[in-house]
Amino acid sequence: MNQAAVSWHSYSDAQLADMVQNGRVHSRIYTDQAIFELELERIFSRIWIYIGHESEVPNDGDYQMRDIGRTPVLLVRGNDHKVRVLVNRCRHRGAQVVETESGNVPSFRCWYHGWTYDTSGALINLTGAEAYGKDFKIEEMGLSPVPRVASYRGFVFASLATDGEPLETFLGRAATMIDLLVDASPTSEIFADGGTHKTEYNGNWKLIGMDGYHPHYTHASVIAAMHRKPEAGIGATHREDPFVDTARTRTRDFGHGHAMLDFRDHRIHQYEMNAAFIRKISGGEAYVDAMHQAHGEQAPLLISLAGDPHLGLFPNMQLINNQIRIITPLAANRTRVTMTAVRLGGVSAEINATRLRQHESFYGPAGAGSPDDAEIFERVQLGMQAEVNPWLEISRGMERERVDDDGSIVGLISDEVPQRGMMRYWSALMNSAA
């Protein structure tokens, strides 16, 4: 491939297709701003993007600021109790009508010229209305709704494209993995109100993935601590190392770029130890009993997983540990990660507090693990600037992966099944200019 610099939109479909090959990808897909611009157009402006959870806007007038690529949007519960996704842009001269990340308001007022919208998006106050002509229709000048919005079990997705596959088709087999989080509650309720923190790193958004190969190296000190204290938390039992290829853990590609580090067999094998730990927490005995009553034969698995499907939904969402993670691309070499801790409904405050402390210990600003990831992503981004031998290997385990009964592709825990699945879908989207 010619290494000469190229300008925006100068890539042909053939060149883009050539960047993802059998077991390897070209590093330019992570470093070139021209490709990043195409990603915004062909991925983030077309497919379903995760926006937020309905529990983040529980009351009328509650809102959260989010982004779809470069399009600023609002997840808002209107005065009619309905949850919407609206473009955060005044219909007059384009100013954002909301500048704070979250809050509760009776209406949205643009500070430029005073146009005011209710929380359903309708324009309710037009300043100097007498100056507008008779053809001006105030009822047609509300905040623009995002063309398509759909939800699955409270998780709200939106698309800037007017047409496309239904959300159910897009999620496919990955949808039932979302259930593993929601049904960790005996009442099948979760609340994304456990606090949010953000981090930004100087690297590409696609570097974040489901990678079972790196923990022993990137997080060596954390893995060592887990082995010293294998009963250190809810769902955190590691009497058997989950990150070795002889373990019961697997990598799994569901299609559409969705992937999972599948700990189900590993965790259910340690159910008694998991249940014993949670019974020691205040309210733990009642929780275990309630889970068996609510979920029957599925309860041991749900208790053992503790709401951690370790699932990545392409392109911008992950459900890991006790968090909902949103990945926001800012530039080819800049990414924001927003992590919101989840509270389970129908459990004691002590159980939720324990879950939150575990989340903070690894993923918090002073956590033992998450800073490792940001650091390694930045080192990768720097290394990929090299023009010598620019191809990256994602072939690990390619000869031993298999297709499971449900149609998903499965490999051992260190295999790069998720990376290959992600890049196959990326390539399909990037090579579809229509």
Image (cartoon, rainbow, N blue to C red):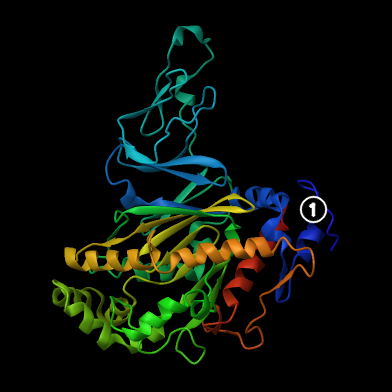
Local crowd size for mark 1, using a 10 Å CA cut-off: few (<14), some (14–19), many (≥20): some
Q: Where does the image place residue 239, in percent across and percent down from the top left?
A: 35, 89
258 vs 31, left or right, is left
- Residue 342's x, y, as percent? 32, 60
Q: Is residue 134 left or right of residue 114?
A: right
SS at badge 1? loop
Which residue occupies the foreground of this view, 84 or 343? 343
Position of 312 relative to 241 (above/below): above
- In this view, 366 is above or below 116: below
Q: Which residue is mark 1?
A: 11
> Residue lying farthest top?
130
Q: On the picture, is 239 further left or further right than 96?
A: left
What residue is rendered at 23% in x and 65% in y?
352
Residue at 36%, 53% in the rendered image: 196
Q: Amino acid at mark 1?
A: Tyr
Viewer-side residue, 82 vs 218: 218
